[in-house]
Amino acid sequence: MELIILGVTFFGFLVLGVPVAFAIGLSAICTILYEGLPVAVIFQQMMSGMNIFSFLAIPFFVFSGELMLHGGVADKIVQLAKNLVGHIRGGLGMSNVVACTLFGGVSGSPVADVSAMGAVMIPMMKKEGFDTDYAVNVTTHASLVGALMPTSHNMIIYALAAGGKVSIGALIAAGLLPALVLMVCMLVAAYAVAVKRGYPAGKFPGWSEVFRSFAAALPGLLIVGIILAGILSGVFTATESAAVAVTYTILLTFFIYRTMTLQNFLRAAAKAVKTTGVVLLLIGVSTMFQYLMGLYEVADFAGDLMSKVSTQPWMIFLLINVILFLLGTFMDMAATILICTPIFLPIAMKAGMDPVQFGMLMLINCALGLNTPPVGTTQFVGCAIGGISVGAVMRTILPFYAALIAALMFVTYVPAFSLWLPRLLMGYKG
């Protein structure tokens, strides 16, 4: 009965439009009160969930991404991408995909990625004669690669939601190949739609311009290399790498590019504080939720239910993907990771999936949810920039969705995409 109350109240609050964090917390409170547990359990679980040293990486990575967003780094990355692939059919669309991938590497946030790239690329594409729905779809889907990059704070959240079963360093290394696969799938989709609609190709500016734009963008892109090299060499931990990212970004935007203003710095700091507050609130209330799910053995119940459908690993993985995708359309990325990891990670591991590989599966599924109504944060941002309705964008979304699902299937059923680099660079034994 307690599990029914937990589930019904949670989804009931979501249907009523209650924000996800409050829906999680209120459903946990209702269940605790019905169970007759001391109310102090609520605060104990919240504090224990937030009081973890590794969570220091979250505000630092968020702040670093906001500094990149407001510090003028995006313009240089856009120019590099345009010079590299702008001469191909539908060149601006291809440039958009590459630019989103590169900026996702330095920001680590799909929302920051679509905000920065969308503000530059969507108006530019519309001016050059590209349809608005195409410009928005390319930007919002390509920006999702930020969730897999080394600066992604969602990796930190997953590592801690996994209960110590996975190394943050291994996750950071594991995200690079899936990110590349995601970029290639998006390039194929963008090119196919461009050919079908007859979009023009741009002009190749010459290798001298490519190298010049690369040199201009290189200091910003180096942040990915610094984080990876520092962690792999043992110079600093994954948590310390976030602080290094902030320090480097401040030096870069203030003293190298000289594009950061005091007003933009304060705006970035305020946004980082707001985002960190939301994430930590989600972590706190989700810890309560996880406590109750553990108490009522939800993971075992879900595993038994799936085993009745099929005992084949490939079918179990497919079911997990479908469930995560559906939940991701209603919940924020961090909330989905925090709630679903304790349930589905044991099931996936029992079926033979490594926790690092499952982390990639989880992040891509949650990223898909960011681009799907009714939550669809990145899609709403992209549509607002493009001045187009979500309905109009959804009508032509299928090729881009297909590209993301193809990348998800590669990651789900080919473990090497997630595990080869951690094994090569870190000697990961999973």
Image (spheres, rainbow, N blue to C red):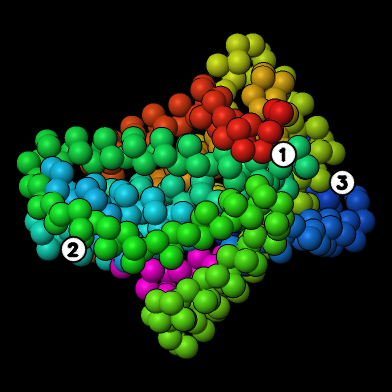
Task: Choose between 164 and 283: the one closer to the eye.
Answer: 164
* Residue at point 36%, 41% (across, down): 183
The percent position of residue 298, horizontal first and vertical second, equals: 75, 33
The percent position of residue 162, horizontal first and vertical second, equals: 72, 41
Instruction: Give the quadrant of residue 70.
Output: bottom left
* Residue at point 34%, 63% (across, down): 215
- Identify residue for label 3: 35
Q: Of helix, strand and loop, which one carries label 2?
A: helix
Between circles 3 and 1, the one closer to the viewer is: 1
Q: Is residue 188 above or below residue 108?
A: above
Q: Residue furthest bottom?
A: 262
Q: Is residue 199 magenta?
A: no
- Identify residue for label 1: 166
Asked whether the beta carbons under mark 3 and mark 1 sit within 8 Å of each other, the answer is no
- Identify residue for label 2: 124
Asked whether the beta carbons under mark 3 and mark 2 sit within 8 Å of each other, the answer is no
